[in-house]
Image (tube, rainbow, N blue to C red):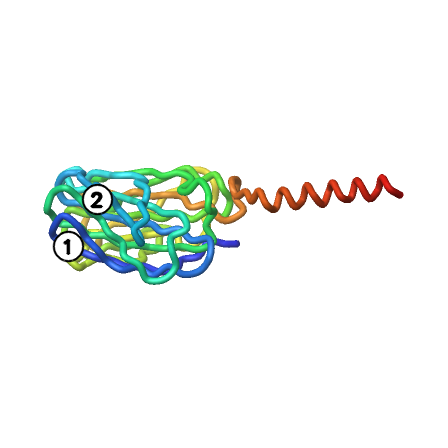
């Protein structure tokens, strides 16, 4: 089963928490939540439908000091449910949720990487892809506001979160499968050549890659083999 993009959502609040709805559909699901966190790295939890999500990685903007943070959850509940981000201090929180189907339900993400660039027009977080037909997903943040995000080479933008101000936080993916080895996503802002961008990228492996394991199917296979051997012995 191939990985496919499902849905995207976003939210913003200036406070100690942010709540926004996201709807997951399909089978073999995976949900990522990308966050721009102003101030200290003081997240106390990220949940979807009250289930705790796992921190994947964090990258810090060189000049501004804000952070790009990525969380993930295997097998999120279907239907419309709330993403809730909680932190200790009261400050700006911007976030996007993006869900995918056809993702292996074990060992996700396969790998992750971070990048922060204070001088060029784009940031290029990279990670090592092991599984064939994997996808890359990423969160991007910027210190320079007012200029919309844009996807660069081999990158698809799913949402530019402009609920606070344009070009502050966005979510991206590869828009399809990527080759194995070191792979990257690339994104920046329209007309911004001065940098101060950061991103976190993660590798999602498809169903059937490596670690997918169903003990019931293995047991059934063993039982069929044993019965065949017994039948052969009675001839």
| Residue at the image point whose x is 42% and y is 53% from the top | 29
Image: 2 above or below 38: below
Image: 28 above or below 184: below
Q: Position of residue 157 (x, y in %)?
A: 31, 56
Visible in this render: residue 100? yes
Q: Position of residue 155 (x, y in %)?
A: 35, 52
The quadrant in which residue 66 appears is: top left
Q: Which residue is mark 1?
A: 13
Local secondary structure at mark 2: strand
The quadrant in which residue 6 appears is: bottom left
Local secondary structure at mark 1: strand
Q: Which residue is mark 2?
A: 197
Q: Position of residue 190 (x, y in %)?
A: 21, 55
Q: What whole-number distance in Å separates the C-alpha atoms at marks 2 and 1? A: 21 Å
Q: Position of residue 106 (x, y in %)?
A: 46, 42
Query: Quick one: 63 or 211, which is closer to the camera?
Result: 211
């Amino acid at each position: 089963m191939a990985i496919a993009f499902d849905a995207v959502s976003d939210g913003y609040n200036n406070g100690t928490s942010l709540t926004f709805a996201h709807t997951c559909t399909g089978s073999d699901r995976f949900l990522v939540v990308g966050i721009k966190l102003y101030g200290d790295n003081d997240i106390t939890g990220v949940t979807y439908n009250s289930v705790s999500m796992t921190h994947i990685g964090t990258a810090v903007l060189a000049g501004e000091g804000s952070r790009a943070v990525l969380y993930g959850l295997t097998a999120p509940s279907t239907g419309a449910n709330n993403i809730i981000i909680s932190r200790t201090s009261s400050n700006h929180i911007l976030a996007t949720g993006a869900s995918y189907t056809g993702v292996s339900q074990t060992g996700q993400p396969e790998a992750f990487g971070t990048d922060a660039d204070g001088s060029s027009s784009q940031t290029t977080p990279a990670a090592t892809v092991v599984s064939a037909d994997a996808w890359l997903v990423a969160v991007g943040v910027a210190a320079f506001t007012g200029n919309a995000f844009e996807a660069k080479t081999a990158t698809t933008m799913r949402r530019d979160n402009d609920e606070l101000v344009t070009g502050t936080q966005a979510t991206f993916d590869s828009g399809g499968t990527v080759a194995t080895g070191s792979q990257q996503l690339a994104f920046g802002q329209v007309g911004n050549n001065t940098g101060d961008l950061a991103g976190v990228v993660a590798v999602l492996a498809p169903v059937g890659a490596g670690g997918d394991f169903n003990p019931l199917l293995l047991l059934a296979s063993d039982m069929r083999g044993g019965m065949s051997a017994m039948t052969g012995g009675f001839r």
